[in-house]
Image (cartoon, grey):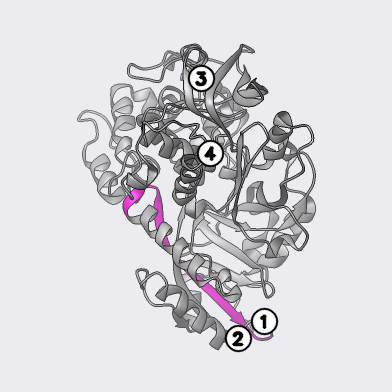
Amino acid sequence: MTTLQSVPALGTHPASGSLPSRAETRDRLSKATYDLLVIGGGILGISTAWHAAQSGLRVALVDAGDFAGATSSASSKLLHGGLRYLQTGAVKLVAENHFERRAVSRQVAPHLANPLTFYLPVYKGGPHGAAKLGAGVFAYSALSAFGDGVGHLLSPSKAAQDVPELRTDNLKAVAVYGDDQMNDARMALMTVRAAVDAGATVLNHAEVTGLRFTRGRVTGAELKDRTSGDEFGVTARLVLNATGPWVDHLRKMEDPNAAPSIRLSKGAHLVLKRTSPWKAALATPIDKYRITFALPWEDMLLLGTTDEEYEGDPGQVEVTEKDTAQILDEAAFSIRDQQLSRDLITYSFAGLRVLPGGPGDTSKAKRETVVTEGRGGMLSVAGGKWTTFRHIGRTVMRKLEQLPGHPLGEDYESVSTLPKRLPLPGIANPNAVAHRLLVDGPAPGPRMAADTAKHLATHYGSLAFDIARMANENPELARRVHPDAPEIWAQVAYARDHEWAETADDVLRRRTTLTIRGLATDEVRAGVESMLGK
């Protein structure tokens, strides 16, 4: 059991060089006139704000909850080309996805993404044959210029060495291909930081209570700070609705008669402790269109996902017993029973995919970005894939630039002239960062643990040195938050002072991995709340 008696003594005062206070940010938002107000702090809104700020526009970004607090931190954690799109003939889409995936994982954020080998098992009587899948993974790797190796077939015995829990009964062959994975919440937070570094003003936990209108056009929003209850407003030349599952809710604020533009599909996931090391991920075909994933992620195993229409309140989406049973049943096609015990489940989460409105099975619907303009001139954007988040930001900016009357003005850099692969903050070789953290420990004190060094390097990049410095200056901050996790208390202080963390869930669920590991105990939560000054 971890002991947290000393945590309150660590102080609740922000460090020097930390973010402006919420009161200062509210004051700044209410006094300025912005070129663009982005409502919605998921990755789509964040990416647009980042690109708009790079263009020299005065940008504000607000969200009713935390940044990446909903769908954007409830993904399958993949940066991928989309293997299943090949069977629908979407070759160009897969090539574009691969281009973005490789740009993010190699040039933009190599400190936040890592390559992952996928095994696609081919069972007797399965929906696809070995020859078809072998050709498919070869074509898939060709579309990424063989940058992740050549897609090929592997023997069941070799695959079982890398994935000990793989079911080998009736296993004919295994197709191999490469993609990448990430911690989606950390990627989103680094993109927020990039937007702020480029000049954007951001505020989370700020709910839109109404829109501002000038001669029938939307020119801002009324907001309420959920942490203090303070009410304020923001004026902007153009307002972008990027609220994801809530996009139609905001459109009705603009026009009560606005027709629905989207539909929602729920994707549920389970996180389990691993019973053995995995050197590759499994992507198992369930039917002609669906694949179930088993991904080694954050020292755990991530299983999913479901795909079914959702018509309830987006704020109430959750994993049901039916979802859990479905995920475990589908995983059992290729994973041994001992790894699928319910006792191993540490966490479950569900996100909502935003799909174009219309009939049909959600699993077959296109994951495309929908952009609409309302009668008051507010632009609404929804949908898309995590992998192409930079591309979506650029696409939205081009749309804004081409609006009649040029509401953004003309005194800014066109998004087409911006650097194509501008890196996210902290860019560095994570292996080199981890090595330096281990070598450069405090002279009189204990060295940093290897798992902590690796964790910091792969979640912060070179910014990990700032956290290490805090831990060196205050030994209390060098202690683990929980003995079974790599996180240290310096990360909590850093989240408070530099990453807009306001609540315990902001820290435990999105800025660290304590919740997904099942380690957000009452004692840990109390310690975090104490440090946050709550």
Quadrant the C terminus occupies: top right
Q: CA distance from mark 1 to mark 3?
A: 52 Å
Please give the residue where the numbered disc 4 appears in the rendered image.
404
Q: CA distance from mark 3 to mark 2?
A: 55 Å
Q: Is residue 93 above or below residue 137?
A: above
Find residue 358 and report its horizontal and vertical position in percent: 75, 56
Q: Is residue 448 above or below residue 269?
A: above
Sequence-wise first label, 4 or 2: 2
- Earlier-in-chain disc, 3 versus 4: 4
Q: Which mark is residue 129?
A: 2
- State which mark lies toward you, 4 or 2: 4
Please indicate, yes or no, whether residue 308 appears anywhere in the rendered image: yes
Name the image quarter holding the N terminus: top right
Reading the image, the residue beneath label 3 is: 532
The boundaries of the magenta stretch are 107-126
Q: Which residue is mark 1?
A: 126
* Residue at figure coordinates x 70%, y 55% from the top left: 342
Could you tell which of marks 1 and 3 lies nearer the N-terminus?
A: 1
Left or right of 190: which side holds 301?
A: right
Q: Earlier in the sequence, mark 3 or mark 2?
A: 2
Q: Specify few, some or many for label 1: CA neighbours under 10 Å numbering under 14, 14-19, or 20 or more.
A: some
